[in-house]
Amino acid sequence: MQTFGAFLVSFLAASGLAAALPAEGQKTASIEVSYNKHYVPHGPTALFKAKRKYNAPISEKLHAAVAAKKALTKRQTGSANTNPSDSADDEYITNVSIGTPAQVLPLDFDTGSSDLWVFSSETPKSSASGHVTYSPSKSSTAKKLSGASWSITYGDHSSSSGDVYTDKVTVGGFSVSSQAVESATKVSTQFVQDTVISGLLGLGFDVGNTVKPRAQKTWFSNAANSLAQPLFTADLKHQQTGSYNFGFIDTTLAKGPIGYTPADGSEGYWGFTATGYSVGGAKLNRNSITGIADTGTTLLLLDDDVVNAYYNNVESAQYDDSQQGVVFDCSEDLPSFSFGVGGTTITIPGSLINLTPVSDGSSTCFGGLQSSADIGINIFGDVALKAALVVFDLGNERLGWAQK
Ligand SMILES: Cc1noc(C)c1CN(C)Cc1cc2n(n1)CCN(c1cc(N)ncn1)C2
């Protein structure tokens, strides 16, 4: 008959926790345990479980208390379709309901920023022409956030700014009752001309929010603790409808396993490190790439040595100064580009790296992989994200990638 200590040692060895094994002859062992920081305890439920475990009588009132709690913590999820804005998959459009009665606006969901801002009744009429706008005065649940303002500039030097309301915001059927909605009183030309979107919904970390004097939480951050799981997934597709799912992972959207890797949210982005890369299905090298998973950037932007290693395999590829990027004959059969992450490999088919002809009818095409040299950060934008189901796991501060 094994002593408990002997059982524990053999269990630890069997479960690969040899590191916790005591040295020869020692009688102790230790093992780290973690707790679910998202679990919200409920007294009557704990009492109910103990009584049930030891077959103790359970009063009607205790049954009622447990049932009431269950009704309140109805497991919650959300699911929203997202569509490419144009034939080049430049950005993705997701409908969002704001206010009471609901005002539906097409927004660009952006894991690379942390502000929810919209074209509104406060946007100059000349700038708002052609855009769907949010009118807080027409929403019974809108409240002005007194004294608050915001101002944001993106990587492409587009920008917007304004004041702030709070209102009910619903995405894919899941509602946040008091979400900071940043109303634009000023927008740059790039946004004025881009009439297919009425603003952005930031899915980055709260630290990146620009509202002053007090930064506001993102919609997802406000939703996280009420969702079944504090995570969302992005399933972006080439010229097809994709989805953003909140609170659950639909693994049927992926072909391969999900590889998880730590996410660094300290700069507001979803930062991570790929362990290596390869071109055309070759074996992955061990040149790591640190960058961000960014749904708000169209392209895959990487270091020059990676970009050159890829385009050295493309006969007609050349840098075109007028296009400010690498172009090639549209007829090229482009090689795939693979990167390692979380123990799995994500392969971007060559077809996704042919973004679009440089102009209508041209036989010269613009590359979906370009240099990140003048940005200073590597960006796994939509060209990379389209090849995968990506899990943005706030609860575990990690990113999951699965081949599609
Ligand atoms: C048309 C078109 N073509 O490509 C885009 C984008 C547009 C939309 N159009 C130019 C307007 C515009 C500009 C931006 N967006 N939309 C989205 C947010 N931006 C980001 C986000 C982020 N995480 N990183 C960098 N910039 C800049």
Image (cartoon, helix red, strand yellow):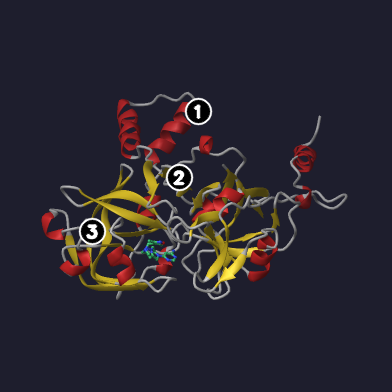
**Location of residue 220 in the rendering, given as x and y in whole percent from the top left corner:** 38, 54
Mark 2 CB near ligand 1 (8 Å cut): no
* Mark 1 surroundings within 10 Å by alpha-carbon count, few (fewer than 14), some (14 through 19), many (20 or more): few
Quadrant the N terminus occupies: top right
User: What amino acid type is highlighted by mark number 1?
Assistant: Lys
Q: Residue at x 83, y 51 (%)?
A: 26
Ligand 1 under 8 Å from disc 3 Cβ: no
Q: Between residues 145 and 41, which one lies in front from this camera angle?
A: 145
Q: Is residue 251 above or below residue 230?
A: above
Q: Of helix, strand and loop, which one carries label 2?
A: loop
- Name which of mark 2 and mark 1 comes first in the sequence: 1
Q: CA distance from mark 3 to mark 1?
A: 60 Å
Image quadrant where one finds the C terminus: top right
Give the number of the mark in front: 2 or 3.
Answer: 3
Q: Return the residue nearer the eye: 373 or 100.
A: 373
Q: Which quadrant of the render holds ligand 1?
A: bottom left
Q: Residue type at mark 2: give it.
A: Gln
What residue did someone put label 1 on?
53
What residue is pinned by disc 2? 229
Q: Nearer the viewer, mark 2 or mark 1?
A: 2
* CA distance for labels 2 and 1: 27 Å
- Whether residue 244 can be seen here: yes
Q: Quadrant of residue 257?
A: top right
Q: Name the residue tied to disc 3.
A: 131
The CA distance from mark 2 to mark 3 is 34 Å
Residue 47 at x, y = what percent? 42, 35
Q: Is residue 205 left or right of residue 368?
A: left
Q: Earlier in the sequence, mark 3 or mark 1?
A: 1
Q: Work out whether residue 15 or residue 287 is closer to the camera in this orientation and state it.
A: 287
Left or right, 32 with reference to 146: right
Q: Could you say whether the residue bearing mark 3 is in a helix, strand or loop? A: loop
